[in-house]
Image (spheres, grey):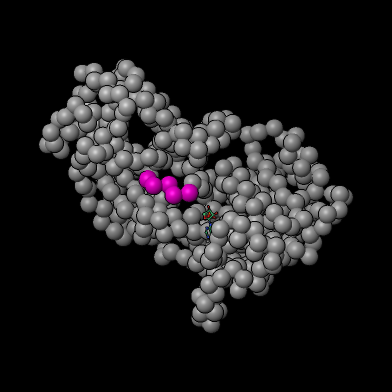
């Protein structure tokens, strides 16, 4: 399942989109978006998809993987593009399955921008919201459908959508779909699709379960990859601080100030922990959003939107909810709690350092998590030696118009604790502003 040396060499030479065989209306959309050169995954995948091959592509979010499948699919659907009002002239020809609502929305948004000069219709369906508007779109006819598996099956079950004319299937973040237990749904969906179709599987990691999935879903696939197996992006600076569990909140705030971090995703393992962390940060006066699977869709979108607009500084997130979040130039990711699975660590830190930009991943590791850290080090084949907390310089102190209120003794205590550990001088100027009284110490759940 390897790309032949000949093909790979030819693809490496293609440095412009117009060399990849895409039609002028698609190229014009890319020019408008400011895309100048194809990313490595796009260089490799686009010609192979255009040639009709099934693909197993190893690429994380941030590598340009969405365009790697969306552009050639649009190109292949061009002969069917039409402006007829008849739903029958717009059967679903391209189906993209994504594990989460956020990823589905994001992929769909990208497709909408890429197809803006083409009379091809698309929509996005996912669970947790009213089915009616989705039904209206589907009944009107769409050539491209982006969906989460469960909601797609709901619509297919009520015969709102027919999948018998699907020519192209994309499984995006397939590893995550397996992790989330979507295999039975995937099999059911597959039974609704024609056997004769082109299938593209994208996954950040390729363990045995993914290879198994590929073998049963794909026909003679070619494998393309843009990063070494299980490696974290080279552009991400990975920092580990050993911190007592109870001191993590202070350490987080300390690092944010010391490194002047304007925005960061802060990962927890569980929804409860994300909620709790988010609330505690809010009480400390830090604009924080919370995003996890139990939040109503509208709340998740609002949090994400605030983050994208810059009104939310920190976004407390679980692994699943954060998957596929695409924020341009996200400078930093925190592992407030290390994930149980080393693969999730790679996914998490892949949220930063995109498209060659440098990124920072800070892990706050308690004594209890040292085994997890060892597992991660083995997985990424790199030592993550703990570093002392960074010094806060005067330049990094908050530049308030009016002097920040002096912190209360209770608020100052934890910060002083962490500074003492580093044996740095205690300086009132360096204290975080305390616009709200400190929260009462809540018992840890
Ligand atoms: P993705 O990996 O598909 O989530 O894409 C990550 C980000 O890269 C998105 O914001 C895309 O709009 C952007 N992007 C994708 N391809 C290119 C390209 N060839 N040049 C510049 N930006 C790109």
Would you say 11 lies left or right of 147 here? Answer: left
Please report the residue visible at 31 percent of the width from the left and 53 percent of the height from the top: 237
Task: Tell me where residue 278 appears, x and y as whole percent.
Answer: 41, 29
Task: Tell me where residue 208 appears, x and y as whole percent.
Answer: 48, 60
User: Of all residues shown, which one is farthest toward the front?
Assistant: 401
Q: Is residue 329 magenta?
A: yes
**Depicted 242 relative to depicted 165: above or below:** above
The image quadrant where one finds the N terminus is bottom right
The image quadrant where one finds the C terminus is top left
**Depicted 129 relative to depicted 228: above or below:** above
**Depicted 411 relative to depicted 45: above or below:** above
Please report the residue visible at 26 percent of the width from the left and 38 percent of the height from the top: 396
What stretch of residues is rendered in magenta? 328-332
Look at the image and tell me whether residue 191 can be seen: no
Q: Nearest the camera: 122 or 401?
A: 401
Q: Is residue 6 magenta?
A: no
The quarter of the displayed image where residue 315 is located: top left
Please report the residue visible at 77 percent of the width from the left and 55 percent of the height from the top: 119
Q: Nearest the camera: 346 or 208?
A: 346
Task: Tell me where residue 299 appears, x and y as whole percent.
Answer: 55, 30
The quarter of the displayed image where residue 124 is located: top right
Task: Tell me where residue 63 appears, x and y as whole percent.
Answer: 49, 59
């Amino acid at each position: 399942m390897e790309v032949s040396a000949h093909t790979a060499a030819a693809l490496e030479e293609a440095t412009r989109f117009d060399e990849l065989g895409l039609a002028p209306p698609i190229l014009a959309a890319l020019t408008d978006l400011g895309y100048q050169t194809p990313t490595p995954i796009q260089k490799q995948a686009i010609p192979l998809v255009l040639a009709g091959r099934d693909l197993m592509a190893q690429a994380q979010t941030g590598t340009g993987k969405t365009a790697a499948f969306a552009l050639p699919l649009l190109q292949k659907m061009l002969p069917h593009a039409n402006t007829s009002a008849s739903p029958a002239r717009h059967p679903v020809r391209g189906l993209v399955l994504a594990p989460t609502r956020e990823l589905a929305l994001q992929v769909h948004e990208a497709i909408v921008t890429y197809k803006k000069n083409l009379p091809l219709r698309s929509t996005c369906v996912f669970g947790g919201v009213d089915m009616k508007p989705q039904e209206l779109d589907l009944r009107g006819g769409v050539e491209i459908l982006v969906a989460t598996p469960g909601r797609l099956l709901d619509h297919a079950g009520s015969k709102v959508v027919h999948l018998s004319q699907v020519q192209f299937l994309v499984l995006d973040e397939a590893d995550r779909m397996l992790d989330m237990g979507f295999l039975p749904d995937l099999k059911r969906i597959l039974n609704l699709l024609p056997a004769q179709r082109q299938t593209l599987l994208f996954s950040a990691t390729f363990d045995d379960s993914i290879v198994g999935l590929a073998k049963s879903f794909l026909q003679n696939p070619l494998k393309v990859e843009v990063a070494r197996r299980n490696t974290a992006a080279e552009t991400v600076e990975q920092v580990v601080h050993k911190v007592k569990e109870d001191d993590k909140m202070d350490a987080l705030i300390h690092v944010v100030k010391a490194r002047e971090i304007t925005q960061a995703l802060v990962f927890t393992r569980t929804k409860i922990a994300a909620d709790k962390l988010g609330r505690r940060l809010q009480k400390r006066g830090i604009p924080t959003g919370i995003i996890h699977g139990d939040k109503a869709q509208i709340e998740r979108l609002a949090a994400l939107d605030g983050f994208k607009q810059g009104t939310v500084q920190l976004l407390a997130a679980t692994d699943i909810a954060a998957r596929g979040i695409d924020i341009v130039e996200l400078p930093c990711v925190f592992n407030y709690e290390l994930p149980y699975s080393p693969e999730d660590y790679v996914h998490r830190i892949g949220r930063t350092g995109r498209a060659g930009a440098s990124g920072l991943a800070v892990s706050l590791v308690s004594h209890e998590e040292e085994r997890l850290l060892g597992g991660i080090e083995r997985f990424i084949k790199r030592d993550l030696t703990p570093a002392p907390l960074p010094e806060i310089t005067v330049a990094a102190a908050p530049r308030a118009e009016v002097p920040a209120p002096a912190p209360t003794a209770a608020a100052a205590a934890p910060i002083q604790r962490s500074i003492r550990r580093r044996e740095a001088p205690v300086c009132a100027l360096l204290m975080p502003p305390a616009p709200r009284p400190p929260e009462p110490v809540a018992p840890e759940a």
